[in-house]
Amino acid sequence: MSAGAPGGRHVRALLASGLAVFLASWSSPAAAGVPCREPADASPAELDGAVACWRLYGDGERARAALDALGKSGGEGKDRAELHRALMDAERGANKKAIARLEKVARRHPDWLDASVRLGKLLLDAGQQRKARSVLDRLAELHDAGGVRSSKDLGWLGEALTLLGF
């Protein structure tokens, strides 16, 4: 339908308003209904997810707020916050700092497979194959000992085995 045809103005107006809504939702995760939890009402586990969610949707301000709240939540929250800081270090190219952070987290929480896999990947990227293999092989040993129980952990084990070339 051409702009001069009857109804053409309505089609253009409809397309323009649709485009405006799309652009507004693209630029603002909250406007798009992003399912990230706000730190004020979230548990440490939800804050952990919120940090990852806000980072995924590119809202650094909300990710930092969730990260700060997670770090202050005590207990394992402080170490989960440290894991997220390590991931942010790696994204900025500060791999040595990220590795140091992840080594501490993985030592304190050997059952956190996500920390070990991410550490193993960074070590491989840094050319430290022997050390990476040691970290990643431990996950297979954990599985053999019955320490991998959840589907999420099986996913991390699969990623570790893939990194090891299996």
Image: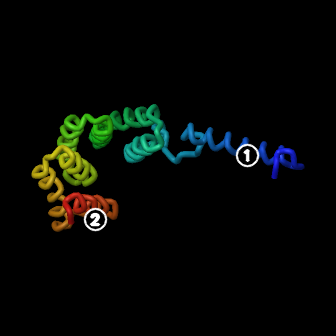
In this rendered view, identify the residue nearer to me: 73 or 86: 86
Contact between marks 1 and 2 (CB within 8 A): the answer is no
Residue denoted by label 2: 149
Q: Can residue 78 be seen in this view?
A: no
Q: Callout 2, which amino acid?
A: Arg
* Closer to viewer: mark 1 or mark 2: 1
Q: Is residue 117 above or below residue 95?
A: below
Residue denoted by label 1: 15
Q: Is residue 115 above or below residue 98?
A: below
Q: What element carries label 1?
A: helix
Residue 98, by quadrant, is top left
In this rendered view, identify the residue nearer to me: 162 or 67: 162
Residue 99 % position (x, y): 20, 40
Residue 90 % position (x, y): 28, 39
Q: Is residue 151 visible?
A: yes
Task: Determine the CA span between mark 1 and mark 2.
Answer: 50 Å
Q: Is mark 2 on a helix, strand or loop?
A: loop
Q: Callout 1, which amino acid?
A: Leu
As drawn, the label of residue 52 is none
Residue 65 % position (x, y): 43, 32
Nearest to N terminus: mark 1 or mark 2? 1
The structure residue drawn at horizontal position 28% and vertical position 36%, both measured from the top left corner, is: 93
Furthest residue in direction right, as rendered: 6
Neighbour tally class for label 2: few under 14, some 14-19, many 20 plus, Cα within 10 Å? few
Neighbour tally class for label 1: few under 14, some 14-19, many 20 plus, Cα within 10 Å? few
Residue 71 % position (x, y): 33, 35
